[in-house]
Every structure is written in C-alpha cells, then in structure tokens.
Amino acid sequence: MKRGWAICPAGHWDPATAADRVRIDASGVPPASTALRGEHGTEFLLDLGGPTTLGDGDGIILDDGSVIAIVGGVACNRNRHDHDHDH
C-alpha cells in the first residue's frame, strides 16, 4: 500500500496534477496514521509520523511521488509538515 508521508501546503503545488482527491471534514479528522481511499480509488496509508493540520487545497505526498488533493479543510490541533513540492 502506498504511504502518504508529508503534506504540501495549498499554493505550493498544482492541484491539476493531483493523482486523486480525498474528502475530509471537521467531523471526520483522520488520525496521523490511518488508511484512506481517494475518490478515484487510490488507497494509501496516511503516515505523517505525528500530528499535522490538514486544509482544503493541501496535498498529501505519497511515497511514489504522486500527490492526493485534500478537499474540505480541517483544523485539527496538530503540527504541520510544510514541504515545498512542485508537481
């Protein structure tokens, strides 16, 4: 299974290049390590190694270099792994 290891903040990557999208809302904040499935079927383990903040337009960087777009912002009291990533 692919692994999402970092978050690329909105504005630091091109959402048009997203391999898939995952919808997250405030009532369904995923833990720092959980299996997720994108809207187009991409399955991956969200494994950020610690707390982070997920926001609308951010991207989850997978270990194969692809990026999954986050749809629907979440403000969860976590540390963010800012990562400049041009895709």
Image (cartoon, grey):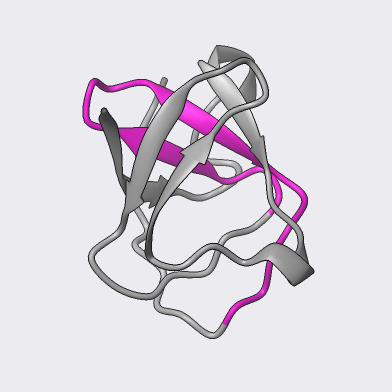
| Magenta highlight on residue 58 | yes
Q: Position of residue 7 (x, y in %)?
A: 41, 50
Q: Horizontally, is 20 left or right of 23 in the view?
A: left
Give the answer, above or below, for where 14 lies relative to 6. above
Q: Position of residue 17 (x, y in %)?
A: 54, 14
Q: Horizontally, is 22 left or right of 5 in the view?
A: right
Residue closer to the observer: 44 or 52: 44
Image-quadrant location for residue 38: top right
The segment highlighted magenta reads: 56-76
Q: Residue at x 76, y 59 (%)?
A: 25
Q: Residue at x 38, y 66 (%)?
A: 32
How many numbered discs sit on the rendered protein?
0
Q: Quadrant of the N terminus?
A: top left
| Magenta highlight on residue 7 | no
Q: Residue at x 37, y 58 (%)?
A: 82
Give the answer, above or below, for where 57 lies relative to 44. below
Q: Quadrant of the C terminus?
A: top left
